Amino acid sequence: MYRYVLRLAAAAAAALVAACATTPAPPGKPEYMLVGVDKKVVFKDDGTLQLLPPGNDSITIVDIGTDPAHPRVVASLPLMNSIFGPPTNLAISPDGKLALVANSVDWTKDGDNWKFVPDTKLYVIDLTSNPPALIDTVTVGKQPSGLSINPAGDLALVANRADNSLSVLSIQGKQVKVVDTVAMVDSVSAVVFTPDGKRAIAAKFPAHKVALLSVEGQKVTYEKRDIAVGLWPYNLGVAGGGLVLTADNGNNGRSDGNVDTVTVIDIEANPPRAIDKAVIGDAPEGFAVSPTGKLAVAILLGGSDGPKNAWFYNRNGRVVTLKIDGKKVSKTGEVQVGGVPEGAVFSPDGRWLYVGNYVDSNITVLRVDGDTVVNTGVTVALPGPPASMRGRVQ
């Protein structure tokens, strides 16, 4: 009799496990991710770029909250944007109601061809309307690129690459306006606020440094203090442990077959300083830190943007995972994604990662598994090549 009861209990447990495995997770709340689609630039077989006529770009809005394992495109706004800004030239406010998107370059005729010139437009998008809608266009500095919204949601910084400056913008409800400009001496490609909103760090791409800024209310001050990092720091993020991590591209935005690094900066030290480097692979461009602060990902071009006859060419790029343990950052894994991967976005709970593949016009869905990520095999088709991606400020 006792064995019979045990068998019944085991069978019931097995049935429960099977039911849990086959029952889909309950639907979640909508959570938006922005994707900048650029249909004007094509990577040719010889590694050069073909510039096509404008008029077909879009800002595509993807719901990653209702079913995080299977994101869904919910809207597309016909707005010009470009792969020539970093994949962080857009952001969603902490309350999820407003989106800012910088258009880095404009398109102009060059004889029978096209060329790009610095633009000055920043789009303001209302995400609460149905469908989401453009409500304003703000003029900022030349070639606005990486941008950041502070945790309070009332201030934003935009890195103007062609102006060597940062635009400071106030956010009051749905009204966004420029309140100041901060001269940075060198060209800046990206910027990020610290979690307390009292500091910001900007990447000086061609100077191979990051700049420290202090923030008090709407006053942003360049402290005239720079920290040397790796070659060509394109993007950066704030991690746990009081760390800032920079993705050091190594070759002015393109692959070259040489390994590159992530520089680890301790901003809690007095003075702040670079304390370590993690060797990751060829040409990190996209970069993201999990909302947990304990995992970061560097998105490697890995030769996928190079000439097809080059010794370092690969069809696909890769995602490198980095574990953050106190002040120590270490590489934990590497996963293949699609061709010329650009942007990366974590889900708000840090359990999922989405990577945009420019050549394939899609998004790869990856599941976070401890200190690494797993490619689920799920892809989300987009209306064109994803040049940039960003989720809500966490």
Image (cartoon, rainbow, N blue to C red):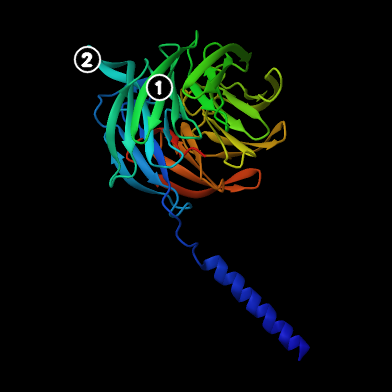
Q: Residue furthest top?
A: 185
- Give the camera-side residue of 234 and 294: 294
Query: Farthest residue in the front direction?
Result: 217
Residue 17 image offset from top left, x and y in percent: 61, 70
Residue on which the image places disc 1 = 84
Query: Which one is nearer the viewer's eye here, 49 or 58?
Result: 58
Mark found first going from the N terminus, 1 or 2:
1
* Picture quadrant of residue 47: top left
Name the side, left or right, on which 17 lies relative to 23.
Answer: right
> Residue 147, which numbered label?
none
Q: Name the spot of residue 376 as percent of width and height, x first.
A: 52, 50
Q: Amino acid at mark 1?
A: Phe
Task: Classify residue 311 as left or right of residue 136.
Answer: right
- Please name the amino acid that badge 2 sits on: Asp
Name the residue beneath numbered marker 2: 112
Q: Is residue 388 left or right of residue 302?
A: left
Q: Quadrant of residue 102?
A: top left
Give x and y (percent) for residue 339.
46, 34
